[in-house]
Amino acid sequence: MQAALNRQVNAELYSGYLYLSMAANFERLGLKGAAQWMRAQQKEEQLHAMKLYEYVIDRGGTVVLDAIEQPPTTWDSALATFQEAYEHETKVTALINDLVDLAIAERDHATNSYLQWFVDEQVEEEASADEVVQKLKLAGEAGLFLVDQELGTRVHLFTLPITGTEAQA
Ligand SMILES: [Fe+2]
Ligand SMILES: [Fe+2]
């Protein structure tokens, strides 16, 4: 189970690396909104990796970090990029399901329970990438500018300054 969780830490870090590469490509193309969306997604993947990292530590295990595979650097279009992001998320969902299967087979109830957060998270991950795919399909080339502006409104929690009300909460 520990080896499988370590592999998932690597898979999450790779996901972040893939999205950062997609962000870099969007920045090169001047699609600032899409780049920001991908930067936020990279942070999300970093959190996923750390969540697994902390779990392995909490269980008295050992985290072993492997080399992160090099992601692609260019994509044919904004639509193709988000389609690949969606496809990637479906693959990650399959990895999470395999982890759950292993936890059940090993009667590792604690790990099974912990992994349920990831099962739920993957529903959101697939939906959010697919939502952009559908928007880009509807917008077409002419609407890309507007979709890009909208994607630029995505703000990750880590980039928000702590306001008075949040600090009190
Ligand atoms: Fe993830
Ligand atoms: Fe993801």
Image: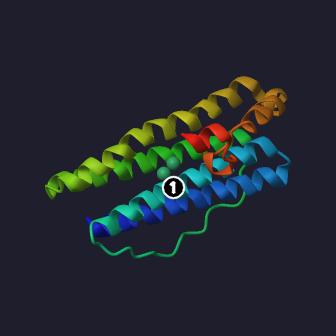
From the image, which quarter does the C terminus lie in?
top right
| Foreground pick, 30 / 140 | 30
Residue 47 in sight here: yes
**Colour treatment of the image:** rainbow
Describe the element under mark 1 as helix, strand or loop. helix
Residue furthest to the top: 138
Q: Residue at x 41, y 46 (%)?
A: 93
| Foreground pick, 103 / 90 | 103
Q: Position of residue 64 (x, y in %)?
A: 40, 76
From the image, which quarter does the N terminus lie in?
bottom left
Q: Position of residue 133 (x, y in %)?
A: 63, 33
Q: From the Cβ of disc 1, is ligand 1 less than 8 Å away?
A: no
Does residue 62 appear left or right of residue 14 in this picture? Answer: left
Q: Position of residue 9 (x, y in %)?
A: 43, 63
Residue 77 in sight here: no
Q: Residue at x 44, y 50 (%)?
A: 92
| Foreground pick, 73 / 126 | 126
Where 167 falls versus 24 (above or below)?
above
Q: Which residue is mark 1?
A: 47
Where 149 falls versus 117 (above or below)?
above
Give the amino acid type for the residue marked by disc 1 in the picture: Leu
Q: Position of residue 103 (x, y in %)?
A: 22, 55
Which image quadrant for residue 61? bottom left
